[in-house]
Amino acid sequence: MIPHVPPNTNSAHASRSRPKATPTPEPQTPLPTRWADAERSLLGNMLHVPPIPKGRESHIGTVVDAIVSLGTYQWSNERNRAIFGAIKRITETGTLAGPDAVRAELIRVHHAEAAAFVTELGREFFSDADLNYWAVQCVELSLACATYSAADRLKQALDAGQTMADVTPTLATLADAAGTPAGDADDDPPEPPTLREPFPLDCLPPIMRRYASELARAMCVPIEYAVAPILACAAASIGNTRNVIIKADWTVPSMLWMGIVGRSGTGKTPPVKHVLFPLRKREQAEYRKHAEAMAEYAVSMLEYERSLSVWKRGKGIGEPPVTPTMPVGVKYIVDSSTMEGLLDVLRENPRGLLRATDEGMGIFNGLNQYRAGADQETWLSIYSGNPVKIDRKTGVNRSVYIPHPCVSMVTGFQPQILRAAMTESRTESGFMARFLFLAPPGTPKVITSARVSDATYRAWRDAVDRMVDMPMPVDADGEPEPMSLTLTADAQAAFFEWSNDNSQITLKAEPPLAYALSKIEEIPARLGLIFTVFGDANATEVSMETMQAAIKLGGWFRTEATRLYGAYAETPQETAHRDLLDIIHRYGGRITPRELSRTCRKYRGKDVARGALDKLVTTGFARLEVQLAPGSVGGKPSDVYVLTGGDAPTGANTPENIENINVLSPSPVSPPQKVKVVSPAPVAPEPAPATPPEPTDDDRVPADLEQANANTELARQAEADEETIL
């Protein structure tokens, strides 16, 4: 039964209380009446966006889902159509479609009646306490509107004398609007989402591999949360000092844009802070040097002004005093900046920068902030390594020219925020396609005493220092010019084979996935360059072995992009299927109907939860087991639904899984069968590992990093396996 929320404007109190869901009106009620009431509730829900209380950010994505699900729905009147159009335009810009913003947009397009109605809706439906309630109703009401619209058109067609054969397309529209396939839904289950492959950790160089494993285990996060900043930091540390020639007139830089996709509170930020600490520490030292140089510069300027005054009083006889040169501050990381500010920093730091932000939406919100339509195009040029020029009307440096811009990025996205950020302009331009997104499933956080060993941290720090210390090459005129690496003959052949295969896959894909796949073509070359220089700063070519590892990792990013973009284009049924799998992942790959009904309102009631889980069994994504309580005799057993990919989900942080993760794959379809599982015997605690020799203070992981670690050393211990990888 689709909930229906009737309008209520009788009292001020009604606007602050939860609307009661009532059954859909009986058939004798005219369809247009039910239709218009559902529209009114839907628009009120969509307007109820700002302010977003903490922890309620998913409502934004729900509104986006509602906009997508309406599609070409025909609104009952021009006023409602205008309001929906304003909400859609505002949401596509990545901003919140609150009452004030929608009202301003309607006034802009000269629709005063709709703007006045928005004020009424804002009063009627605005309630902080009911935000979750409205979020749950929003998509369902949008489907209700589409259903009423299709049903009304069907009734009008039959009344006009058309036959059932004539109205078959209308029946199909009605079935699509209701969110179920025509026919028996149980006989035609939804197509499952693209299965996720485990991250190929073996593709990384040994130091990266070891550091990523230990960092993910210590932080209790998926391995991808550690890999993303590691790759971005390595690319930025090399920067403009090196590039790689694929063939004549095809050169790619050491630059990656990494996007970590995960819900708020899943631990995206701590690994980034840990990985970037060596660069942050170097930058602190550079800031101190710059402060001292600026103090000396201030004294020199006083001397210069005094000498200049004397020279002027002498009527310009002799050579004028030389103007002191302002010291340039060395920077490695920028957190936030306008495009003009970023280019100024790039001009002073030709080897390149790393942009690291907690929330990727800040990057998009800052686009075109001061220059309409120009910032996004500038970013596209930066990613390709093409020269960038900007002319200003004011300022000391009115013309800024960067011949070799190089800015790597690492940032985080919440899933629904990323969905809202994928507007038509950002996808069609290829801006979003340049990001490599890593979106691991949610996993339970298991706090242990694991930590990044001092030897592993020291190896990572030294590798970063070694790359940053590489001098910036210059051309014959003394201008910065990257040193170019080449591909060996077999490495070049392997890359061409990858490129041709990727072109065929891209040709069959649809936008916006096709845009992303076209940009992934270069990724193995960029990764091969980074892996080569990370291992040997004096290397002059990329080997076949390195290219094979880079191509394998590029293939994983291609599969991940296919899965991610597919999730944002899936039907409501496919979304529900994937969300259910994600919930089970968060429970460690196994869940009971009782746990599911308590976790999500959508599955409230054990019978509803059991029905949804049984469908996973029939489609081969889960198996049903009977779990006895530990130590129980004659107690009531529990039905446990276990994902068929293994007890530990992709990205689980158990030591045995961190480098060898199971793939979730469906098993042959068969009726649900219960498997009796006896209670596990108590496991004896593991003996404490041997304590390695105490390292010196310079080799320890810095104290502030230890405190920032989400799993700071709970007990002083080190790895029994303390192999040296320097």
Image (cartoon, grey):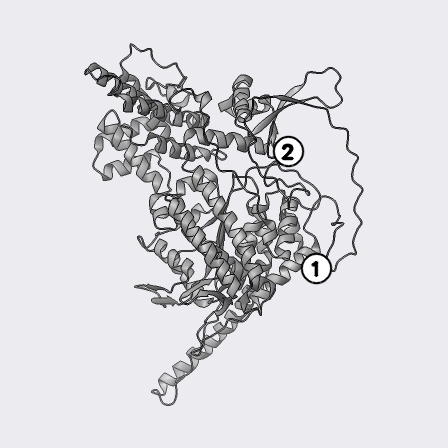
Relative to residue 386, is residue 217 drawn left or right? right
Answer with the quarter of the image where residue 544 lies. Answer: bottom right
Tell me if I can see residue 553 in this picture: yes
User: Which disc, if any, is residue 647?
Assistant: 2
Residue 536 lies in quadrant: bottom right
Residue situated in front as seen by the camera: 162 or 41: 162
Q: Position of residue 489 (x, y in %)?
A: 51, 65
473 and 541: which is toward the camera: 541
* Secondary structure type for disc 1: helix
Q: CA distance from mark 1 to mark 2?
A: 38 Å
Q: Identify the residue at horizontal 61%, vertical 55% (top origin).
A: 208
Q: Is residue 305 above or below residue 701?
A: below
Residue 597 locus on image (x, y percent): 55, 22
Q: Position of residue 521 (x, y in %)?
A: 44, 54
Label 2 secondary element: loop
Tell me the residue at 43%/55% (across/down): 337
The quadrant of the picture occupied by the C terminus is bottom right
The amino acid sitting under disc 2 is Asp
Q: Residue at x 71, y 22 (%)?
A: 629
Per the image, the residue denoted by label 1 is 699
Of the pair 394 and 4, the residue shown nearer to us: 4
Q: Does the image show residue 365?
A: no
Q: Type of residue at label 1?
A: Asp
